[in-house]
Every structure is written in C-alpha cells, then in structure tokens.
Image: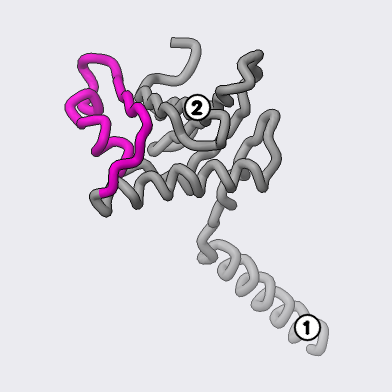
Amino acid sequence: MRLWCLLTCLAVSMSCDTAGAQTMPQVSPAPKRQLVNITEPEANELIQKLKQAQRQLKAGESPRFELLTGSLAFLDAIRVSPREAFLAMPFDRVWEIERSRTDNRLWQPYKLAYAPKGPGQLYWKIEVVLGFYGDIERITMVYKPPAPF
C-alpha cells in the first residue's frame, strides 16, 4: 500500500511539473548587440549622439548634418521623408555597429544595422560619419533586403 501511495504521489508531482513547464511562456533573450572595431562605451556614445540629434530636430533646433534616406522604389519606406525616417529610428535597438576603417583622419565612418522585423528580413543599413571634432557630419539610411540580394 505504501508503495502504491508513493508511486501515485510521484506520478502526480511529475505531471504537475510537466504541466507547469508547458504553461510557462518561452521568452527568448534579446540579441546581444554585435560590435566590430568598436568598444561598448564608444558604441553607446555614438547612439547617444544620434539620439541627441533626434531630440534637437524634434525640438525645432537646427543640427548641421546631411541626412539622406532611400529604399527600393516599390517599398513603402521610399514614401517617407528622410527626416521622418530618422526621427522614427529606434537607435537603442540597433543590433550591429561597426567602425569602418579609413585613411581620412578628418572623418570617422560607422555602419549600423537595424532590422525592425527581425533577422533575415528587410533592414535599415545606416552609415554615420563623424567629423574631426566628433560631430555628426552625415547620416545615410537605406532600407533594403538582406544579403545576398
């Protein structure tokens, strides 16, 4: 009889553990930002500069940098003005930042990537050029399909 009670209790506890595991939502961790030729503090500083430029534009100030955007002609992203695209960009969610190598000491280019619908989908390729004093000189944003297209 004790063996029967022990087996019953064991079966009930196992079914509760299994049921609990099945009802727990599976949350995938946020992907870690990929950094190439840049440190985490430098990447954070670049993101802060971009967010500051967004705040300045929203506040009606006149930050002095070139802003260019584009996309394939048939995509809806082409209908959005460069300013709107820039202001809507969630720079905190950029998943890749790369410092490009250059021989020009006056310009420091960076490449960023942001995929709003996840990896393997259309994404924003963002190129940011900082000038000699670390100010933003140019931002180019292109909404495009992932490689190899």
Q: Quadrant of residue 39?
A: top right
Q: Would you place residue 87 above or below residue 2 in this image?
A: above
Which residue is farthest left? 79
Report the residue marked by disc 1: 6
Query: Which residue shows up at 52% across the image and 29% down it?
Result: 131
Q: Position of residue 123 (x, y in %)?
A: 41, 28
- For this rendering, which residue is in front, 5 or 66? 66
What stretch of residues is rendered in magenta? 61-87
- For this rendering, which residue is in front, 127 or 136? 136
Other residues around mark 1 within 10 Å, as few (<14) / some (14–19) / many (≥20) = few
Give the label on residue 101, or none: none
**86 in the magenta segment:** yes
- For this rendering, which residue is in front, 144 or 118? 144
Which residue is farthest top? 149
Give the residue type that dot 2 points to: Val
Report the residue marked by disc 2: 129
Query: Which residue shows up at 20% across the image and 27% down it?
Result: 76
Q: Would you place residue 72 above or below residue 125 in this image?
A: above
Q: Is residue 1 left or right of residue 30?
A: right
Q: Nearer the viewer, mark 2 or mark 1?
A: 2
Q: Position of residue 56 (x, y in %)?
A: 33, 49
Q: Secondary structure at mark 1?
A: helix
Give the residue type that dot 1 points to: Leu
Quadrant for the N terminus in the image:
bottom right
